[in-house]
Image: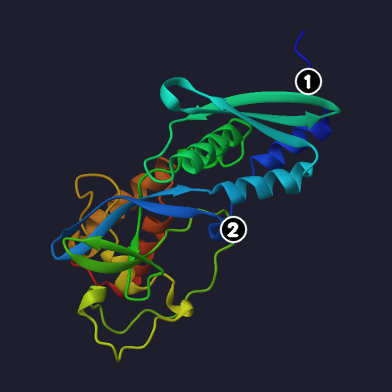
């Protein structure tokens, strides 16, 4: 007979698996390029080891979990994460290869994050697919594409109430490479890191026959059809849906 977890235990598992907020998530560029004169980049979400440890400490307390490492196949690392649940220690394990940069530290960190995901910590990030950087001159991140440096912001994946947005920009200028700016230009403001007409139009199409094409270069009718399909199929493309809504109001693309 399979034992049913207590309400308290089930609550612990649910809290461990709660989605991380945007400010707790890190991003890296998987691939990038320039199409029709505009930059695009597919980005991948992850959490660092510090965020995983903070989640374990906040849910269980620092004395109710422990981590052990051992050698894995072909020089890899195996991490065994033990949690004290209902007074009993339960262990699960997972592993990772050593990394090229800081091999020991990187291998330990990767193994730790993987075994945390086995317990549900950050596991939802494995389901995040087809996320695209939002390029703008006020972007918090940088990526070099074809010798030019561009700024970009990460898409939002957190489940939270919508925030108010500033009015769309009057013009529809293209993102400017960082190394093409002058020294007299002012530093970007944090308040500008929101979706605007400019950043929405530069967002690459995340799926379909126009995939990778900037939304400004996709006929508005096609954007609407793609939006209706995504909603009908319940596909997770929140920034695309927001971008289409913004572009419909401003109509910066051809119908």
Question: Where is 130 relative to 41, above or below?
Answer: above
Residue 251 in picture, x, y percent from top left: 27, 72
Q: Secondary structure at mark 2?
A: loop
Question: Where is 55 relative to 191, above or below?
Answer: above
Structural crowding at the residue carrying mark 2, measured as other residues with C-alpha within 10 Å and reported as few (<14), some (14–19) or many (≥20)? few
Q: Nearer the viewer, residue 199 or 210?
A: 199
CA separation in Å, label 2 and label 1 = 31 Å
Q: Is residue 248 visible?
A: no
Horizontally, residue 98 falls left or right of residue 49, namely: left
Residue 255 in picture, x, y percent from top left: 19, 64
Question: Where is 135 relative to 166, above or below?
Answer: above
Give residue 64's quadrant in the image.
Answer: top right
Instruction: Give the quadrant of the N terminus.
Output: top right
Q: Is residue 153 visible?
A: yes
Residue of label 2: 160
Q: Nearer the viewer, residue 217 or 40?
A: 40
Residue 177 in picture, x, y percent from top left: 23, 73
The residue under the point 67% across, 50% down is 54
Residue 183 in picture, x, y percent from top left: 28, 88
Closer to the N terminus: mark 2 or mark 1? 1
Q: Nearer the viewer, residue 151 or 195?
A: 151
Q: Nearer the viewer, residue 104 or 96?
A: 104
Structural crowding at the residue carrying mark 1, measured as other residues with C-alpha within 10 Å and reported as few (<14), some (14–19) or many (≥20)? few
Residue of label 1: 4
Horizontally, residue 82 falls left or right of residue 157, namely: right
Horizontally, residue 202 falls left or right of residue 245, namely: left
The residue under the point 43% across, 35% down is 98
Q: Secondary structure at mark 1?
A: loop
The residue under the point 30% across, 92% down is 184
């Amino acid at each position: 007979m399979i034992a049913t977890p207590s309400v308290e235990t089930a609550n612990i598992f649910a809290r461990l698996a709660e989605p991380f907020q945007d400010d707790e998530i890190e991003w890296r560029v998987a691939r990038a390029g320039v199409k029709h004169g505009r930059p695009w980049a597919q980005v991948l979400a992850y959490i660092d080891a510090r965020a995983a440890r903070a989640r374990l400490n906040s849910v269980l307390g620092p004395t109710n979990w422990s981590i052990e490492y051992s050698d894995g196949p072909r020089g890899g690392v195996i991490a065994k994460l033990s949690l004290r649940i209902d007074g009993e220690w339960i262990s699960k394990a997972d592993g990772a290869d050593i990394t090229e940069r800081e091999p020991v530290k990187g291998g330990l960190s990767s193994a730790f994050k993987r075994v945390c995901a086995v317990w549900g910590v950050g596991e939802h990030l494995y389901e995040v697919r087809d996320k695209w950087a939002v390029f703008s001159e006020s972007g918090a991140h940088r990526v070099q594409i074809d010798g030019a440096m561009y700024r970009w912001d990460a898409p939002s994946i957190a489940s939270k109430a919508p925030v108010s947005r500033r009015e769309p920009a009057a013009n529809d200028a293209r993102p400017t490479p960082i190394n093409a700016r002058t020294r007299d230009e002012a530093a970007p403001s944090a308040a500008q890191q929101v979706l605007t007409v400019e950043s929405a139009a530069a967002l690459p199409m995340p799926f379909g026959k126009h995939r990778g094409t900037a939304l400004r270069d996709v006929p508005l009718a096609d954007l609407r059809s793609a939006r209706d399909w995504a909603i009908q199929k319940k596909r997770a493309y929140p920034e695309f849906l927001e971008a289409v809504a913004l572009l419909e109001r401003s109509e910066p693309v051809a119908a």
